[in-house]
Image: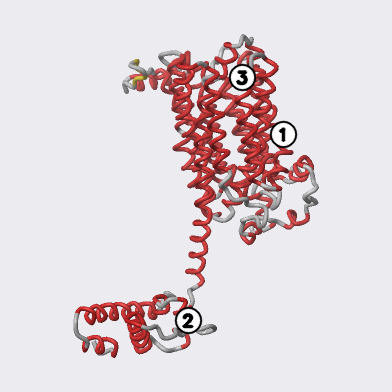
Amino acid sequence: MNHRCCQDSSASSGALAHLRVVLCCLLVCWACIAGREGGGLGVSAFVPASSLSAGSSRPRSIPGPVGALATGATAAARTIAPRSTTSTTMLRSKSPATRNDDEEEEAARAVRGPFALLLASQFLLFIGVGAVIPSIPLYGKEIGLSGAANGIVVSAPAVALFLAASWSGRRADLARKPAMMVGMAVIAASDLGTALATGLAPLVVARLGLGAGRSLSEAGERGMLVDLANQIPELRGRALAAQQAVVALGIAIGAPAGGLVVEEYGPRAAFLCVTAAALVALVLYAFLPETVAGGSGKDDSKSDSNKSPEDAAIGMDESTPGLGVWAELLKRNDWRGLAVCQSGVSFGYAAKIASVPILAASALPGGALGAGALLSAAGLSGLVGAPIGGYLTDRVGSRGAAVLGGIVGGLGLVLVPMALNLPATEWGGGLCGYIDGLGIVLGGTPLDGRALSFSAAVLLWSLGASAQGPALVALAQERSERGFEATSLSLVKAAGDGTYVLAPFLLGLASDAVLGVPGIECALAGSAGLLGTVALAGLVGGEREEER
């Protein structure tokens, strides 16, 4: 080494001198690398900020060995590093690409904490929600309700969700966190009221309260997800997929746990589990940041890229009621397409609840046991479909991913009656014979071709629907009006909830009208999903692309 700092250090004696030599050389090498690569670190990165004079980047004298090291390394760096203005600028600044990468990483770090806390609270909540699934029909029987009265109890939350959607959206647009916390408190109180109810009237009131609480809380959650996802638009699909997968996993864990609770303590105990889960989620929500008041928490430049001149001219302000916002949105093709598509999706979920269990009990070995196993597998397929949908959303776009998922899911339900009638045709009999030879068993009983084909069709629908979910939400987020995000998203949610109230009745009519074709109602639901997907492909995208 010929550098002065190294020569001075070599002249010293003892262990301290050798240590200073090594550290000095390391600092010199780092300074040289930083100068040549333009990494923006330089020697000043090793100098305490307090040692810099006001208005100057030159360090003041630092006493002691550290000062000697800093002085020597700085002198060596000035000797070796290029002195041109361009090189000096490279030392002190980063390239635009590097700055953009740093900004994206900083935005991801800012989102990571609140997003993880939101997912954790929803995971715990839906474990409780899953515990209620096997309890609702049993609870009605326990307090002596008829089948019709039990149907009213089951549908009451969906009615409240639909009626309160626009009002809840406007409240959530004013502030996300209060809407989430108030709604969650109402959920906890309503499930407690359900557990304590002794007749039809208090039970219906409690279930209506549950729907109202869900409407308000979910509106705030959707709005907060928009705010967080707008900061990382390149990861929007995967973030929404993670949220959907967490919900599916919570329900998958909660349903069998709820069965154990019901068996041990009775149906009322399951609703107490939801109350406890809602209270825990309420506490966790208190630690979330507010993403509206005092700054939306969104990158306006990124949000503006999704806005058209039509958005800027749209006649809405903070005094516009929720229904008024919906009326303005429905003047546009993209929101009409989103609403129609979500209605088609709800037909599929109605078929899953109203028709698939009955068909599975007759087609699969074990009856109700086989039906429960198929429904559990369909729920768990969301853990596969949701990440696929999120990945496709980020790679090919939310519109393309939603169309693809809708086609796959719709075809799955359309194939249900064909699968149940395979042995009736020559080629179908051959296919069943081939499947029989595979030796697939359920609960110790081999699955025949008819059972396995039916199961495959249902799982195909579940995979497509779970992949379409995050894509549809991402598409709605991208089209949502700034300042009206929760209300905009509640329009799509209300379209699905309203359809879900009527769809089981319509599917039942189709099943009664065509008694000779088992599963025809599933084909009707699949056709509705395909029509909704066609509407989405035709109404969403072209208008905005032309404006851009």
Q: Amino acid at mark 1?
A: Ala
Question: In the current view of this chain or complex, which residue is farthest to the left?
Answer: 14
Quadrant of the image occupied by residue 275: top right
In the rendered image of this protein, does residue 104 appear above or below residue 445?
below
Q: Is residue 433 left or right of residue 539?
A: left
Q: Which mark is residue 164?
A: 1
* Residue type indicated by callout 2: Leu
Q: Is residue 47 visible?
A: yes
Q: Amino acid at mark 3?
A: Leu
Residue at image position (36%, 22%) is: 435
Looking at the rendered image, the quarter that the N terminus falls into is bottom left
Quick check: can you spot residue 38?
no
Q: Which residue is label 3 attached to?
A: 196
Q: Which element is circle 3 on?
A: helix
Question: What SS does tag 2 mark?
Answer: loop
From the viewer's perspective, is 283 left or right of 155?
A: left
Residue 403: x, y in percent?
57, 41
Structural crowding at the residue carrying mark 2, measured as other residues with C-alpha within 10 Å and reported as few (<14), some (14–19) or many (≥20): some
Residue at (68%, 26%) from the top-left corner?
208
Residue where numbered disc 2 is placed: 52
> Furthest-front residue in view?
64
Residue 478 coordinates in the image, percent (x, y): 62, 50
Decide: is 239 above or below 138. below
Q: Depth-wise, is mark 3 or mark 1 nearer the camera? A: 3
- Comparing 118 with 58, the one in front is 58
* Quadrant (top left/top right/bottom left/bottom right) for the C terminus: bottom right
Q: Position of residue 103 (x, y in %)?
A: 52, 64
Tell me how far mark 2 sits from mark 1, CA to CA: 60 Å
